[in-house]
Image (cartoon, helix red, strand yellow):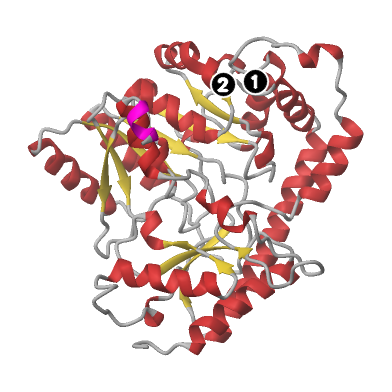
C-alpha cells in the first residue's frame, strides 16, 4: 500500500482525497453550448467570468514583460512595486484610518496561501479558531492542513449573524472550548460574508474588535470581496466597511488586527494567484516572511497586478463595470428563483453568490441516507446527474441541511441553463420521493 511509504502526515492527507474536487467534477465533462451542451455546469466555484474579456484586453495591450521579470525579483514577499501599488489601492478605496504603507503589505500565491501561513504563525496545533456558521468552506482545509488548528464553529441559532447579539454566541463557544482545554487564539471573519453575501456595519465590526481585545485573540478580516458590492434595489442593504477604516484606539490593539485581500475577486483575476496580508504587527510580518518562500508569488503575476493597480482610471472603470454586472446577474438569478418559489438569504449585496434553501426538496430518509446531511448529499447527486454542480451547505458548516451556494458570475446564457437544470430537477421530485 502506497500510504505505508508515506510519513504520518502524508498518510493523513492521502486519505482525504483530491483537494480540488470542485475542479475535478467538471474537468472531464465541461459544458459548452456548442460542442458539449450536455456537459456539467458548475455553479459551485467562486470564479468570476464576467470580467475576463476586459482583463485579457488589458494584459495583452498594457502589461510589458521585460528581462528582469524572469528572475527571482525582490524576494518572496512580492515586488516593491506591487506592494506600493496595492497600498495605494487600499488607501484609495478602503479609506484606512491610518494610511497603509507598502511595508505593511505582504504578497503570497493567493489568499489560500495567506490563510495557511498566517494560521501557521498564529496558531499552535490544537489551538482554536472561531468561525461563525455558515462560513467559507475551504477554511476547513486552509486552517487545519498544516497549522493543525481546532475549528470552533459558532452556531447562530436564529440570531442575526450581522448583529451585536451574535458576539454573545462567540463568547459562549469560546468559554465552552476553554472548559475543554482548548485555547481560542483567533477569530476569522469573512467581510463581506461568504456565503451570505452580506456586509457588517461599522458598529458590529467594532463589537468584534472589542471582543478580540477582551480575550487577546487575533481578528482576521478576509475582505477579498470588499469592492464586489452592488446595487440590489434594497436601500437598506449595509454598505461595505473595512476594519482598516475604524480607529483602533480603545477598540483593539493593532497587533491583533489583520486584513486579507487579493486580485482574485474584486478584479476577477483568480488565475494570477495573488493574495496579500495587510498588518501592522511587525512580528507577524517577520514570521510570515520567513516561510513565505514556500508560497512565493509569481513575478509575472506581480508585474501584471502592479500595472493594473497603477492604472487608476482603468481600475475605477473595471470595478464599476464589475459591480454593474454583478448587480445585473444577481437580479437575473433572484428573478428565476422567485418565479420558481425557491427561498434564499435576503440582505446580501456583495460577492458572487446566493445562499439558497433547497430543504423542501430533500428526499425522505431511508436506511441508506438516514440523517439530513446525507439527504442533502443525495439531492446534490441528483443535481449532478442532471448536469449541474452546486456546493452543499455541509461544506459551509451550515446549521441546517438543504442550503446550497449558487454562483451567478457566468455569462447569462450559461447561468440561465444552469439555473434551469437546477429548477427542473427539484421540481421533478416532490419532497418524500
When the figure is inspected, residue 411 is found, relative to residue 429, above or below; the finding is above
Question: Which residues lie in the magenta part?
Answer: 2-6
Q: Decide if residue 335 is in sight here.
A: no
Is the C-beta separation of discs 2 and 1 under 8 Å? yes
Q: Quick check: is 412 in the magenta stretch?
A: no
Depth order, front residue of 115/94:
115
Please state if 1 lies on the left or on the right of 322 as rendered. Answer: left
Q: Which mark is residue 105?
A: 2
Query: Looking at the picture, does residue 58 appear above or below residue 213?
Result: below
Residue appearing at x 18%, y 40% in the figure: 174
Label 2's element?
Answer: strand
**Dominant secondary structure (helix, strand or loop) of the stretch shown in magenta:** helix
Q: Write the residue at 68% across / 14% down.
A: 80
Label 1 crowd (10 A; few <14 / some 14-19 / many >=20): many
The percent position of residue 43, horizontal first and vertical second, equals 59, 63
Vertical comparison of 116 with 384: above or below: above
- Please tell me in which quadrant of the rendered image residue 338 appears: bottom right
How many discs appear?
A: 2
- Residue 261 picture location, percent across and down: 56, 35
Question: In front: 175, or 387?
Answer: 387
Any mark on residue 83, and which? 1
Q: Residue at x 38, y 46 (%)?
A: 203
Query: On the picture, is 422 further left or further right than 207?
Result: right
Q: Is residue 209 left or right of residue 386?
A: left
Q: Residue furthest front?
A: 1
Indicate the position of residue 127 as horizontal and vertical percent values.
23, 30
The numbered dot on residue 364 is: none
Closer to us: 168 or 397: 397
Amino acid at each position: 500500500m502506497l500510504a505505508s511509504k508515506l510519513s504520518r502526515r502524508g498518510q493523513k492527507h492521502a486519505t482525504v482525497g483530491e483537494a480540488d474536487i470542485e475542479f475535478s467534477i467538471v474537468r472531464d465533462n465541461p459544458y459548452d453550448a456548442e460542442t458539449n451542451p450536455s456537459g456539467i455546469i458548475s455553479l459551485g466555484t467562486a470564479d468570476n467570468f464576467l470580467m475576463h474579456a476586459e482583463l485579457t484586453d488589458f494584459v495583452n495591450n498594457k502589461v510589458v514583460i521585460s528581462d528582469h521579470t524572469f528572475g527571482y525579483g525582490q524576494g518572496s514577499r512580492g515586488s516593491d512595486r506591487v506592494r506600493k501599488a496595492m497600498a495605494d489601492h487600499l488607501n484609495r478605496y478602503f479609506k484606512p484610518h491610518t494610511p497603509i504603507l507598502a511595508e505593511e503589505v505582504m504578497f503570497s500565491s493567493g489568499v489560500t496561501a495567506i490563510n495557511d501561513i498566517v494560521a501557521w504563525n498564529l496558531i499552535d496545533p490544537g489551538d482554536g479558531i472561531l468561525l461563525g456558521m455558515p462560513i467559507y468552506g475551504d477554511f476547513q482545509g486552509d486552517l487545519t492542513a498544516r497549522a493543525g488548528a481546532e475549528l470552533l464553529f459558532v452556531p447562530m441559532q436564529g440570531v442575526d449573524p450581522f448583529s451585536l447579539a451574535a458576539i454573545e454566541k462567540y463568547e459562549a463557544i469560546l468559554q465552552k472550548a476553554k472548559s475543554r482545554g482548548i485555547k481560542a487564539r483567533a477569530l476569522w471573519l469573512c467581510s463581506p460574508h461568504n456565503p451570505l453575501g452580506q456586509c457588517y456595519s461599522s458598529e458590529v465590526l467594532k463589537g468584534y474588535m472589542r471582543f478580540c481585545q477582551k480575550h487577546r485573540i487575533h481578528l482576521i478580516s478576509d475582505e477579498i470581496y470588499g469592492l464586489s458590492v452592488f446595487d440590489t434595489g434594497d436601500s437598506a442593504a449595509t454598505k461595505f466597511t473595512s476594519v482598516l477604516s475604524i480607529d483602533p484606539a480603545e477598540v483593539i490593539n493593532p497587533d491583533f488586527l489583520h486584513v486579507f485581500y487579493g486580485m482574485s475577486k474584486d478584479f476577477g483575476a483568480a488565475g494570477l494567484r495573488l493574495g496579500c496580508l495587510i498588518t501592522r504587527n511587525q512580528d507577524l510580518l517577520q514570521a510570515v516572511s520567513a516561510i513565505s518562500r514556500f508560497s512565493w508569488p509569481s513575478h509575472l503575476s506581480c508585474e501584471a497586478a502592479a500595472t493594473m493597480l497603477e492604472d487608476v482610471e482603468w481600475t475605477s472603470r473595471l470595478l464599476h463595470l464589475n459591480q454593474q454586472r454583478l448587480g445585473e446577474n444577481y437580479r437575473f438569478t433572484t428573478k428565476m428563483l422567485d418565479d420558481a418559489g425557491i427561498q434564499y438569504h435576503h440582505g446580501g449585496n456583495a460577492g458572487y453568490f446566493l445562499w439558497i434553501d433547497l430543504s423542501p426538496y430533500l428526499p425522505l430518509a431511508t436506511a441508506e441516507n438516514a440523517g439530513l446531511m446525507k439527504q442533502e448529499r443525495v439531492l446534490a447527486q441528483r443535481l449532478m446527474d442532471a448536469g449541474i454542480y452546486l456546493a452543499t451547505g455541509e461544506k459551509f458548516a451550515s446549521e441546517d441541511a438543504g442550503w446550497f451556494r449558487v454562483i451567478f458570475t457566468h455569462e447569462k446564457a450559461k447561468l440561465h441553463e444552469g439555473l434551469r437544470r437546477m429548477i427542473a430537477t427539484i421540481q421533478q421530485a416532490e419532497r418524500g420521493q
